[in-house]
Amino acid sequence: MKQFIAFFALFLAPVPALAQQEAAAPPPAADAGIVLPPEDDDEGGLTGSVTDESAWQDLGIAIPAFATNANVATPANAQGTYELGRELARVITSDLRNNGLFRPVGPDALPRPEFAQINSPSWPTWRARSAEMLVHGYVQAGADGRLTVGCYLYDIQLQEQLEREGWVVEPEDWRRAAHKCSDLIYSRLSGESPFFDSKIAYIAESGPKDARIKRLAIMDSDGANHRFITNGRSTALTPRYSPDYKSLVYLSYINGNPRIYVYDIGTGQQRLVTQSNNPTFSPRWSPDGRSILYSMAVGGNTDIYRVSANGGQSTRLTNSPGLDVGGSYSPDGSRIVFESDRSGAQQCYVMDADGSNQRRISFFGGRCATPEWSPRGDQIAFTHVVGDLRVAVMSPSGRNMRHLTDGWQDEAPTWAPNGRIIQFFRTARNSGDASLWQVDLTGRNERRLPTPIGASDPSWGPVLP
Amino acid sequence: MRFPITAMTAASALALAACSSSPPEQLPPQPAPVQETPAPAPTPTPTGPVPGTNAHFMSQMQGRNVVYFDTDKFDIDADDAASLQAQAEWLMRFPDSQATIEGHCDERGTRDYNLALGERRANAAKNYLVGLGVDAGRLSTVSYGKERPVALGSDEASWARNRRAATIVID
């Protein structure tokens, strides 16, 4: 996290210490905290034009292009901050469109407000179009090249400002400012926690079914800033972002056998999580990032172990003759949900973080696999195997099981940071082609995520600080 | 049941290949050629794989280097036992050889669990070979879970061929 400063102390509550320290520096603006566009009444009228009247019919949120005080060059956009303002609004529109709650209309269908109108919308213009919510924003390039992005949410009917916030970002982080604005709007209007400003690690797949190339890859929550981490010469599987996004833990066959490694994103170096001649797999971080759960097979029997993220001696947490696999911490770190076939088939179990008090929670028929505890703590997502594989959720006590998907093979759910959306991967019959999908907790609003090639094993990280 | 190696004919090789996952690329080696007269022509004649190599093992096993499992199971049934008996005999004939046993699963399970299940299957085969007298130190295991299918369909016949433990001699 570099040079990403939130101005409003009001919004700093969930932000870790690093960002708070940064924000403690004198804000660049006066007491209100926000950087306000200078008043400039020279021009009163709107510019731009409405290019798609039909889009107005369903307008819920109008997101016109962000204004700029002066069109200046920026590494963030080849055409300068003026065009960057349009791109910012496009990113926000895409974010909000893709979760089923809103009907956003983006900058390509809307008139563009002037800089001076950002904190003083032209109400008649927007009201006449029967929009309910209005997003305004601006982008300014500072002398040091950094960008200041302001985001304002208005209720058009009330003609009131609901939210405003601003951020200073490095030019390469401009999309993060858009995601922060999306999060601001989403949180205010839905009452849920934010999630757009987050990243996903996954496995990129290509090649035929019997010789699939599997590469570790990362991307933003909307698929942007995609990057391959491994070159595909050895199979990579099941990545997980560390809570601070500084490293990835994943499985690699790089030495010929399955072993889990911690990959440092900053240095590009990786190391074995534990030195052992036995296969290790299914790695998971603890919520504080200090320890890693992994599964290790000894003589064919698999148990779950915990090791410090810095290495050292492992602690064995399970000791059953069955296959004990995976593991996902409750958000407070006190409990772990995992799968075991000690009863004869895969079922989900909960234990205390020290391995004590193991008890089965899944009693609804079929098999329970890949349990993942919601970041909110109220649900456990898992793969329900009854012939087909489907994504389902249940309470931490194993009650109220319900399916969220009805595919032929949907597996490995991972939670959005706000615990309201789940990603998983779907495998196609015969071809084996895999793709990433997303569904909300109602089971509606299922959609495929764009990836450059095939994709599996998604792992959604927390909201960036 | 066992097929004495010396009795292996082209016909029986084909019959066995029908139920094997890797049909042999060539027939078993001919009896050792008699080198009494120099070859009149430099044309190289196929002499079969070098004894003790993986190619030799594969040609001798005729598909029996692989054992198959029921869904979510890892027990060794009678067919598996016959295959492992043949593997053990070969391995004891070449006591310097080392082998890896690959454990595999069909695609109808979750990834992590299949890694564990593949390891369990590879170990089941390994333990059986050890029980037949093969030194455990010569045998290693590796699980590929559902990552390396040999049959590419999404049907019961394909899945049955993919639930397997395959023994590979390390050259």
Image: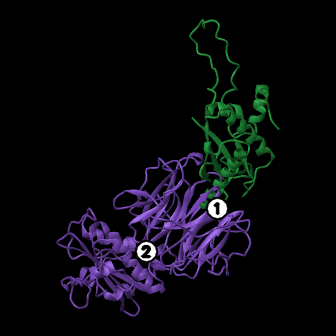
Name the residue carrying label 1.
Answer: A409
Name the residue carrying label 2.
Answer: A196
Viewer-proximal residue among A134 and A204 = A204
Mark 1 or mark 2, which is nearer the start of the sequence? 2
Quarter of the image for residue A383 reads bottom right
Q: Amino acid at mark 2?
A: Phe
Chain B on-screen colour: green
Image mark 2: chain: A
Quarter of the image for residue A299 reads bottom right
Quarter of the image for residue A5 reads bottom left
Colour convention of the picture: by chain
Label 2 residue SS: loop
The disc label shown at residue A387, or none: none
- Disc 2/disc 1 C-alpha distance (Å): 27 Å
Query: Does residue B23 show up?
Result: no
Label 1 residue SS: loop
Q: Residue at x 65, y 47 (%)?
A: B152
Viewer-proximal residue among A133 and B130 = B130
Q: Amino acid at mark 1?
A: Gln
Density class for disc 1 (Cα within 10 Å; few <14, some 14-19, many ≥20) is: many
Chain A on-screen colour: purple
Where's the N terminus of chain A, which quadrant? bottom left
Q: Is residue A60 left or right of residue A267?
A: right
Q: Residue at x 66, y 33 (%)?
A: B57
